[in-house]
Amino acid sequence: MSVELCGVKVPLAAFALELDATLAGRVTAIFGASGAGKTTLLEAIAGLRRLKSGAVSVDGAIVVDAEAGVFMPPEQRAIGYVPQEGALFPHFAVRHNLRYGFDARRDRPAGLTYEHVVEVLELSALTERRVGTLSGGEKQRVALGRALLSAPRLLLLDEPLAGLDAALRERLLPYLARVRDEFAIPMLYVTHSPDEVMALCDDVLVLDRGRVVARGAPAEIFAKSERPRYELRGG
């Protein structure tokens, strides 16, 4: 499975996101400082932000082509999106959040069942609780489970560990690794944490002011001689 970005251009306040790239890793990191265009890229792929020009295809199917006037609605793209804050429904219990968008009739990878997702993310003790009673880490696990249960062909994760303290990030990383290893769903993972990239990803696309400034394997990108360049404004 691959994501093809062909002449993609999205104007932003201070610069434009401009990309030509093929993303085909099992987990591809979209890395860079805050404001580099990472979230904009995910939104363009998910259909939440319009392109000025260019095209995006997922697994060979064109989801948007600005010049040809093609725009597939987000709900038809079969893309799971987990924003930074999770965007759960606060008036629903966890169980109802997880089942939102779940369709038992949709083709799904083997093992991608409600029961298995709950097991992998260790959510069984939370299913009857209201979202407002959950910790930050629990909310992110529920948001991830909900995205998985929509049976996506691609999973977009926008800094899922941002805003959590270091100890909680360490506890959540294994859950993300289990999702990577248990389910055959490619992921694009936005972050400005080299540690998260090294733990989870097999490919890295480095953005700076909307442009690709480096591309490669995590060990290559974060070699000691390169780290200051990319971490200077990472926060």
Image (cartoon, helix red, strand yellow):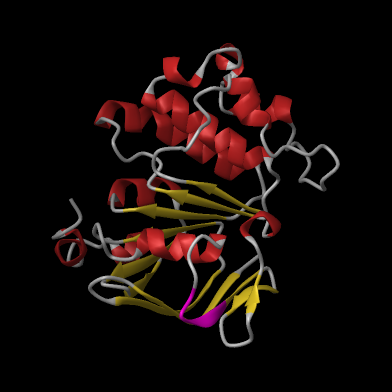
Please give left or right for residue 185 compared with residue 207 in the image. right
Count of labels shown? 0
Q: Is residue 61 magenta?
A: no
Say above or below: 182 vs 194: above
Residue sitting nearer the eye, 72 or 32: 72
Query: Residue at left 29%, top 53%?
Result: 192
Residue sitting nearer the eye, 177 or 101: 101
- Residue farthest to the right? 105
**Residue 19 drawn at (x, y percent):** 42, 79
**Residue 88 drawn at (x, y percent):** 51, 32
- Quadrant in the picture for the N terminus: bottom right
- Residue farthest to the bottom? 67
Residue 32 visible to an observer of this rendering? yes
Query: Residue at left 32%, top 73%?
Result: 210
Say above or below: 83 vs 216: above
Q: Main secondary structure of the magenta part?
A: strand
Q: Where are the magenta residues, as a range?
A: 51-55
Query: Residue at left 46%, top 37%?
Result: 86
Residue 25 visible to an observer of this rendering? no
**Residue 48 drawn at (x, y percent):** 51, 60
Say above or below: 207 vs 129: below
Residue sitting nearer the eye, 169 or 137: 137
Say above or below: 177 vs 130: below
**Residue 129 drawn at (x, y percent):** 54, 13
